[in-house]
Image: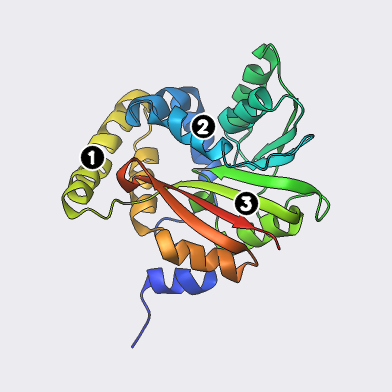
Amino acid sequence: MARTTVEIAQVSGIPAGPARDDAHRMFDRISRRYDLLNHLLSFCLDFYWRRKLIGRLPRKPGLKVLDLATGTGDVALAISRKRAESHVVGVDKSEKMLHLARRKRDAQVAGGALTLAHGDGLAIPLKSETLDAVTIAFGIRNMPDTGVCLREMHRLLQRDGKALILEFSLPRNPIFRKLHLFYLRWVVPFLGRLISGDRYAYRYLNQTVETYLQGEDFCRLMRESGFTSVEAMPLSLGIVTIYEGTKA
């Protein structure tokens, strides 16, 4: 029997659903309203989700962290503020998102060293085994090949380094799942288009969330990419999940 697109994605790491190759151009278009819509559409839960992600970072001085798909820099900036002794690099393919991240960084009063650079999450120009942690928040499902991205993360980590991935997911509870799908399919695209002026971006959001690997399927791909001690930690009734893996 022929495999479905989702089953193929589970094997290859290539996500089902919309193409991702030009996703950075979409983020360029919506960059001006991106933060506002993040807070509005998540009912400000995005602040809580990022705190939980950052709370999973290794407890060691002089932490070296890469934040992939850093966008407007919220995770990278939060790590820099919370861990003043840290060295953080934020990388993104969208120049307009990076421009906003740099403005936020320049306005930040205190924090650790923070570098923001243009880059591709599938080919990161950093030396192998140099980082204590790699984070990515709501960005891995936008990569054209999840498996390649995970292997790049694994390559960059030192032994016992952590990959910490925050991504949208779907609730398991059938009633809440139906309510959440209605919100994703109808409310999010309507508000996204109204506020950002982009007809495509927030339809892309619900399509990628619904077709992307989740839970044990994503954990399996992390293990296949070399990670050990892989965990999936659902938050907010399962509308997002933190995935954590260690480089042995």
Q: CA distance from mark 2 to mark 3?
A: 16 Å
Q: Position of residue 217 (x, y in %)?
A: 44, 66
Tell which of 51 and 183 is nearer to you.
51
Q: Which mark is residue 51?
A: 2
Q: Position of residue 90 (x, y in %)?
A: 68, 36
Instruction: Please identify the quadrant where the C terminus is shown.
Output: bottom right
Judged from the image, the secondary structure of the residue bearing numbered disc 3 is strand
Residue type at tag 3 = Ala
Other residues around mark 1 within 10 Å, as few (<14) / some (14–19) / many (≥20): some
- Foreground mark, 3 or 1, reads 3
Residue occupied by mark 3: 163
Q: Position of residue 241 (x, y in %)?
A: 43, 48
Tell which of 149 and 51 is nearer to you.
51
Q: Where on the picture, by quarter, is residue 76?
A: top right
Tell which of 216 and 136 is nearer to you.
216
Residue type at tag 1 = Tyr
Name the colour scheme.
Answer: rainbow
Does residue 235 lie above or below 122 as drawn? Answer: above
Residue occupied by mark 1: 183
Q: CA distance from mark 3 to mark 1?
A: 30 Å
Does residue 89 lie above or below 160 as drawn? Answer: above
Instruction: Please identify the quadrant where the N terminus is shown.
Output: bottom left
Other residues around mark 3 within 10 Å, as few (<14) / some (14–19) / many (≥20): many
Q: Where on the picture, by quarter, is residue 146?
A: bottom right
Residue at 27% over, 55% down = 172
Q: Which mark is residue 231?
A: none
Q: Position of residue 211 (x, y in %)?
A: 36, 59
Dot placed on the residue nearer the N-terminal end, 2 or 1: 2
Looking at the image, residue 40 sits to the left or right of residue 66; the answer is: left
Judged from the image, the secondary structure of the residue bearing numbered disc 1 is helix
Residue at 66% over, 62% down = 151
